[in-house]
Amino acid sequence: MAGEPAYKSVLIKLSGEMLAGTAGSGVDQETLGRFAQEVFEVSQMGVQVSVVIGGGNIFRGLAGAAKGMDRTSADHMGMLATVINALAMQDALERLGCYTRVMSAIEMHQISEPYIRRRATRHLEKGRVVLFAAGTGNPYFSTDTAAALRAAEIHAEVILKATKVDGVYDKDPNLYDDAVRFDSLTYLDVLNRGLKVMDATAVSLCMDNNLPIVVFDMHQAGNIARVVRGEKIGTRVENG
């Protein structure tokens, strides 16, 4: 049937920078509200929806380490930033009437549930949007890798990588007018060419588990629903 979802379970990976809007840092409430509306609409389609949000709008562990901080301490701070973003998204979703759960890889009982795979699966089966926070709980691993890991654990059918551009290009389209966009790529294409999709650990994890990645423009209203309905937008990364 036209308009029916092509997937039963999706994981949306959203960068923290996207929540900052034009401010560049922090959480822009208008941008947050628009993203939450799109996530809610997809959940209303009967699709199991989980979300991983980065923390770059608040603190990025790699940036802290580059300035001399201990890498482990810096990464822990970055994980806490993702919890702040998850709580912000939870609030925005629940104001729309969406049932949610924040599950953190670092235990914070007062504000979130600890991540337990079977419990996460049960929440999704009940129609709740699950927000995975604090990355993997380990330093040296990105939120891209956390997204790939959680998606594999809960048996999501696809990772939806929401970005500022309409797919994957051979070079930065903001700097080069002759940049070429790919409609599809293999995981090995991404790894061998060093394309900016997700980090190498995340891409390898997706490859090993045959987990497709769709990279698309989040600024285009309604794109999450379009991807979930199976429309060919953005760039799809999968086994060749």
Image (cartoon, rainbow, N blue to C red):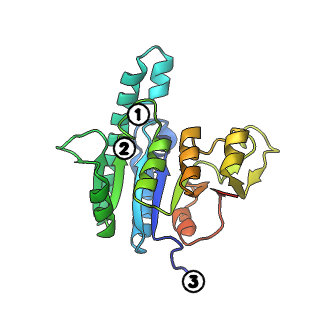
Residue 198 at what x, y percent from top left? 58, 43
Mark 2–mark 3 distance (CA, rounded to whole Å) = 34 Å
* Residue type beneath disc 1: Ile
* Residue underneath mark 1: 58
Residue 163 at what x, y percent from top left? 57, 49
Extreme bottom residue here?
1
* Residue type beneath disc 3: Ala
Q: Which numbered disc, 1 or 2, marks the residue that appears first in the sequence?
A: 1
Which of the labelled discs sits on residue 2, or is there none? Answer: 3
Residue 70 at what x, y percent from top left? 40, 17
Which of the labelled discs sits on residue 85, or is there none? Answer: 2
* Residue type beneath disc 2: Asn
Residue appearing at x 41%, y 62% in the figure: 49
Extreme front residue here?
208
Extreme left residue here?
110
The answer to whether one can see residue 233 in this image is yes
Contact between marks 1 and 2 (CB within 8 A): the answer is yes
- When the figure is inspected, residue 62 is found, relative to residue 233, above or below; the finding is above
Mark 1–mark 2 distance (CA, rounded to whole Å) = 9 Å
Q: Which numbered disc, 1 or 3, marks the residue that appears first in the sequence?
A: 3
The C terminus - image quarter = bottom right
- When the figure is inspected, residue 76 is found, relative to residue 18, above or below; the finding is above
* Nearest to viewer (mark 1 / mark 3): 3
